[in-house]
Amino acid sequence: MSWSYSYTSEIWPALITLALAIYLGSYSWRRRNIPAAKPFIMACFLGGIWTLGVILELCAADFSTKVFWVKFQAIWQLPVAATITCFLFEYADLNRWLNRRNYVLLFLVPLLSVLFIVTNDFHHLVWTGFRMNRYVIASPGRLYWFFNSYIYLLGLINFAVLVWLAISSPGHRLPVAIIISGQILARVGYTLDKLQVIGPGESILLSVGVVAVAYAWAFLGFHVIDPVAAAHKAVRRQMGDGLFVLDLKGRIVDVNPMAASILGIPENSLRDKLLMEVMPIDAGLLEQSEDKRIGQTDIILGEGNSTRHYNLNLTPLIGRHGEFIGQLILLHDVTEQKRAQTQILKQQSVVATLQERERLARELHDGIGQIFGYVSMQLQTALKWMRDGNEEKAESLMERIVEVSKDAHADVRESIFSLRSGSDKSWSLIPALNKYIDRFQKNYGLRTELSISDGIGDNTFEPASEVQLLRVIQEAMTNCRKHSDAHFLKIGVELDGSKAYITISDGGNGFDASRFEHEDSDHFGLVFMRERMDQIGGSLNIHSVPGGGTVLKLEVPVRKQLEESK
């Protein structure tokens, strides 16, 4: 071999092909972190070496040098085809099939072809000889068409993968059509070359160049190797929410690793299953989502200690022409938030209980405690008078003690009655107040009238506010019974914008209200009432003069939902 070369215009198709391979390879190299880019970089590299062999064959001056470069080209043809197949599997997101065993099966024939090509001079199973007729013409050996038929087998596999991708992902249909067209032209060019219908330059342009153009169009025009698309894929795999993609029949066509982890089922086993087979979800919910997005819906998965709470978001998927093409489901784990909320409610309940116990302790100390202290002192005085023989004074004092004891007993009964009012978990203020008034009139004979304006209902007040309001009204009614000597009592509840007003009035003795305007007042009932109103963001006002009755006015915010609806 002389290894001498000369320029010929026939190399231009091959030069164009080499330039395309270099450009696409460098474009993919800059995005090599994307899984689909790696096999394509390798295909461009191998295709470039194949094309270089064609250029050197056409430029070679003597026959033996041309034969060498023909053999050199043959070494890379099957590896290029196998590498392109790997790329298409990655592109179609079927890389789960690219395990070690399948890699060995895929590249076994290309590796055998390299081995037999390199050793052909010893066995002549690939080529039996070469002759010159403008271009080098090879005489096929026994294994020649066996190895070359592998190119067509890979073409059928590529075609099946691309058709599946076009069916399962409508957005890929146009770039898939372009790639399939390039694949078909490549096989046509390869076949024409083997049949010696066209020369090496035209053959490499069709076999590698046209495919490169088709891929370039798909990549650059439709962003196949695109960091944005890769980012979407990475987010889908790394996101902490479970993701399910459903077709029109409610079958799972795609899931992310988190979704498989939530259900405890492998991704491959979930695909093509009906969602209702693997998740307790109502079929009506899926049908409803075809028309609009469904907001958060709670769903519970697992049993016993493994129970988990999830928020389920269901969104319809709309095609480019506005047609309904499927559904997207996201499962967000809210188990820890649920547990935290439960813990907070328990803590609030404990705090409320402790506060109520503290209030009761103060009321018992300042009310019943003081009465028992008074009774004890008076009994000691009565005993002393009896020892001194002053029975008349002792009897008079004992009568007073009996009256005080009766009042104390009534106070205890009323305290128990007040605490029992509202103990039912399903109660609300207005029904509880009506029940309390009925028993109050029956026990004490004090006529009480309740008037409620329009707009006041079970949802007017916050639940925490209702309890405090009931206790304040009860305290006001008790004060009226004990101190006012009134014969009737009026309670009115009115709604005015974002606030409600509760008025409690009597026609009794009245008192000097200015004596109780300060927080350090020794009238603990009024102090407790003010404290309760402060806790719910309300206020308490007292209007009273001696001999002119008393009017107690409570101002309290209404429920936020009611205010917003207005």
Image (cartoon, helix red, strand yellow):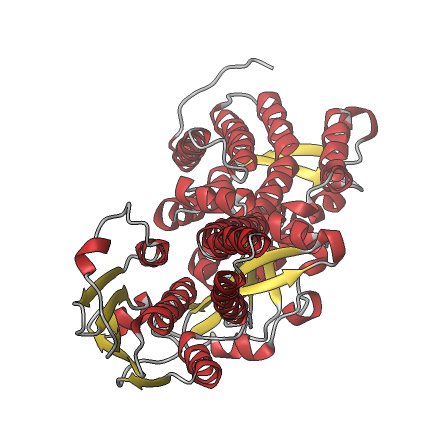
Q: Where's the C terminus, which quadrant?
A: bottom left
Q: Nearer the viewer, residue 16 or 331?
A: 331
Q: Residue 288 in the image: state x and y as whole percent.
A: 48, 78
Query: What residue do we see at 50% from left, 68% from top?
Result: 399
Residue 86 visible to an observer of this rendering:
yes
Q: Nearer the viewer, residue 305 or 528?
A: 528
- Counting every numbered tag in the picture gives 0
Q: Where's the N terminus, which quadrant?
A: top right
Q: Residue 451 in the image: state x and y as whole percent.
A: 29, 85
Query: What residue do we see at 31% from left, 66% from top?
Result: 560
Query: What residue do we see at 59% from left, 77% from top?
Result: 283
Q: Quadrant of residue 156?
A: bottom right
Q: Nearer the viewer, residue 470 or 149?
A: 470
Left or right: residue 38 versus residue 534 is right
Left or right: residue 505 versus residue 297 is left
In the picture shown, does residue 77 fall above or below 427?
above
Query: What residue do we see at 40% from left, 24% from top?
Result: 7
